Image (cartoon, helix red, strand yellow):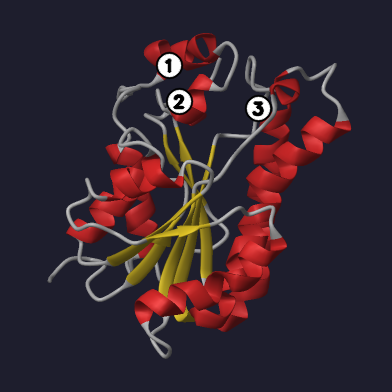
């Protein structure tokens, strides 16, 4: 099969519904020639059902990124699908979670904040390190962030967690660069996904895009962000690392 990911093997986390960026990234990756493996947490049967809606059904591995046993066994489970000597060419990190307390900046407890940071930021490093034995020079890690340059309404400690993710990306790019592995993020605009439903006041946050995106933004269309992910997974950015590519209709660059 031809395409910009022809012959590549990609692991995609965070697929929960067809409205997720992760699903679109997996779909576009398959259409561009990649072999895709998914991971799921919690609602594994739901992920397996959604996996069948991809152009080609994809295997699903259970993964809780806060469970060290899951991380320690992940490479072995991926090998079961790829074969012992077949490398992994890319990882898509689309994992974030914040307890309700993380959405109240002044009242948020350390327990809530630490959970948000561990799941949303630290897991970017721990997931990559778990799969590092399978990766070779030219491999690409791509994560998903929400612009952490400014303070958004209602986002609170999740914004801090995304700032931690963006910093983690830079340090990971620094340390894996000598191995020939690129690490980049896609900063996507808001989307009406399962993740959005967990954000109190999401509509107020998302309304910014209705007025501020110069090229427009569709809250129901995750495909542009998915395409951005696939672009960074491809060989078209061979010397781009530690970068944040905005796929947000241009809102990030608009002044007051």
For the residue pair 30 and 75, the one nearer the viewer reads as 75
In the depicted structure, whether residue 221 falls above or below residue 115 = above
Q: What residue is pinned by disc 2?
A: 251
Classed neighbour count for the residue bearing mark 2: other residues with Cα under 10 Å, few (<14), some (14–19), many (≥20): many
Q: What residue is pinned by disc 1?
A: 212
* Residue 224: quadrant of the picture: top left
Q: Position of residue 179 (x, y in %)?
A: 57, 82
What kind of element bears circle 1?
helix
Q: CA distance from mark 2 to mark 3?
A: 12 Å
Q: CA distance from mark 1 to mark 3?
A: 15 Å
Q: What residue is pinned by disc 3?
A: 150
Residue 129 in sight from this viewpoint: no
For the residue pair 132 and 152, the one nearer the viewer reads as 132
* Residue 183: quadrant of the picture: bottom right
| Image quarter hosting the C terminus | top right
Q: Identify the residue at horizontal 64%, vertical 22% (top origin).
A: 155
In the depicted structure, whether residue 205 falls above or below residue 91 = above
């Amino acid at each position: 099969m031809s395409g910009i990911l022809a012959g590549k093997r990609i692991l995609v986390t965070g697929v929960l519904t067809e409205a997720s960026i992760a699903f679109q990234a997996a779909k576009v990756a398959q259409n561009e020639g990649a072999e895709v493996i998914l991971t799921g947490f919690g609602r594994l049967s739901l992920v397996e059902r959604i996996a069948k809606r991809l152009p080609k059904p994809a295997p699903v591995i259970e993964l809780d990124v806060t469970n060290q046993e899951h991380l320690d066994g992940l490479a072995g489970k991926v090998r079961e699908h790829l074969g012992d000597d077949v490398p992994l060419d890319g990882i898509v990190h689309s994992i974030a979670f914040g307890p309700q307390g993380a959405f109240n900046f002044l009242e948020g407890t350390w327990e809530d904040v630490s959970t948000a940071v561990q799941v949303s930021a630290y897991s970017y490093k721990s997931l990559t390190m778990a799969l590092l034995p399978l990766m070779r020079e030219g491999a690409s890690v791509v994560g998903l962030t929400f612009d952490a340059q400014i303070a958004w309404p209602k986002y609170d400690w999740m914004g801090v967690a995304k700032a931690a993710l963006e910093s983690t990306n830079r340090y990971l790019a620094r340390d894996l660069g000598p191995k020939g592995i690129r690490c980049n993020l896609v900063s996507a605009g808001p989307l009406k996904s399962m993740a959005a439903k967990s954000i109190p006041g999401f509509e107020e946050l998302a309304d910014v895009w209705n007025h501020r995106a110069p090229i427009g933004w569709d809250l129901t269309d995750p495909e542009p962000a998915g395409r951005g992910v696939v672009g960074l997974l491809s060989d078209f950015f061979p010397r781009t690392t530690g970068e944040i590519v905005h796929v947000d209709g241009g809102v990030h660059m608009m002044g007051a």
